[in-house]
């Protein structure tokens, strides 16, 4: 049976470095999966892709051995079960606001008698020999708390049987709790947001589940590990591409900005 390497790292007390894919392209996914991440998730919620793009991305990442996951668009059993059947080992579900929603999410993740997942692991059954109900213990269910209602129900959500962790998206958490006073974004430095992010980690620890945080930089992700987070996402394909391209262009502009253009010397070119 396939073992979830994220769970294995956690069992050893090690943090998980998590990557993020928003570009619907198998080659981009293959490149990212070869860079040494412990796990990578495909963003079907906000990414420029859908399930038909995600499936070949899963296939492209298989050779790397990275643990593959997905963020689904919503609390919808159809897409949750479909990404599991495609081979996702970790599923992140957005906008979980109550313990009832968290329990519903968990039920879609597991085969009976622990849930109501339908059997039909089309790709998983091929790519993961022995795939079946025993995978109930290997699949990770990660709920996102992003709203004031979710924060108000934090303790109850974290106590949901079968929930493996809470995944924090700082942008929506800021929008959802600060009434528009603060702009969305990663790597929060406001004292009230740091306090909230740290409180989520403490509640997770209290309930024996894992806290996960989406970060923009490795420096902030390292700080989050110190706060008790067990998985940190360090940026993603689109932002990394944009950042590297911008840095390259800036370097060229800086180096050549004061260079006089050569005069034409005549002749045919």
Image (spheres, rainbow, N blue to C red):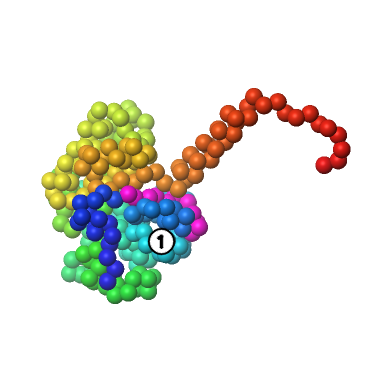
In the rendering, at what x and y percent does residue 85 appear? Answer: 34, 67
Under tag 1, what secondary structure?
A: helix
Closer-to-camera residue (17/144):
17
Q: Which residues are magenta?
A: 17-29
Closer-to-camera residue (102/55):
55
In the rendering, at what x and y percent does residue 159 appear? Answer: 14, 50
Quarter of the rendering occupied by the C terminus = top right
In the rendering, at what x and y percent does residue 147 appear? Answer: 27, 40
Please determine whether, in this image, residue 69 is positioned above or below residue 201: below
Residues packed near mark 1 inside 10 Å, few (<14), some (14 to 19) or many (20 plus): some
Q: Is residue 30 left or right of residue 110?
A: right
In the rendering, at what x and y percent does residue 191 appear? Answer: 25, 28
User: Which residue is rendered at x = 23% and y = 71% of the image?
Assistant: 133
Give the residue number, with chain letter if any, for mark 1: 64
Residue 8 lies in the magenta stretch: no
User: Which residue is rendered at x = 24% and y = 29% of the image?
Assistant: 192
User: Which residue is rendered at x = 27% and y = 65% of the image?
Assistant: 3
Closer-to-camera residue (203/155):
203
Looking at the image, can residue 97 be seen?
A: no
């Amino acid at each position: 049976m396939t073992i979830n390497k994220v769970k294995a790292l956690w069992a050893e007390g090690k943090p998980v470095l998590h990557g993020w894919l928003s570009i619907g392209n198998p080659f981009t996914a293959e490149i990212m999966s070869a860079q040494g991440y412990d796990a990578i998730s495909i963003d079907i919620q906000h990414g420029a892709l859908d399930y038909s793009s995600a499936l070949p991305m899963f296939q492209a990442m298989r050779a790397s051995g990275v643990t593959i996951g997905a963020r689904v668009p919503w609390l919808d059993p159809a897409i949750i079960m479909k990404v599991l059947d495609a081979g996702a080992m970790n599923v992140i579900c957005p906008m979980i606001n109550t313990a009832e929603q968290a329990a519903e999410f968990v039920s879609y993740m597991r085969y009976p008698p622990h849930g109501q997942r339908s059997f039909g692991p089309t790709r998983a059954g091929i790519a993961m020999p022995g795939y079946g109900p025993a995978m109930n213990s290997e699949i990770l269910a990660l709920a996102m708390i992003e709203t004031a209602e979710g924060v108000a129900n934090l303790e109850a959500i974290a106590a949901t049987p079968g929930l493996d962790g809470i995944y924090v998206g700082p942008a929506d958490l800021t929008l959802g709790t600060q009434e528009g006073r603060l702009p969305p974004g990663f790597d929060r430095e406001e004292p009230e947001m740091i306090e909230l992010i740290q409180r989520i980690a403490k509640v997770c620890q209290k309930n024996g589940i894992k806290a996960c945080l989406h970060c923009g930089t490795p420096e902030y992700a390292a700080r989050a590990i110190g706060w008790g987070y067990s998985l940190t996402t360090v940026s993603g394909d689109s932002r990394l591409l944009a950042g590297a391209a911008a840095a390259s262009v800036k370097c060229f502009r800086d180096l050549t900005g004061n260079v006089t253009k050569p005069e034409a010397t005549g002749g045919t070119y």
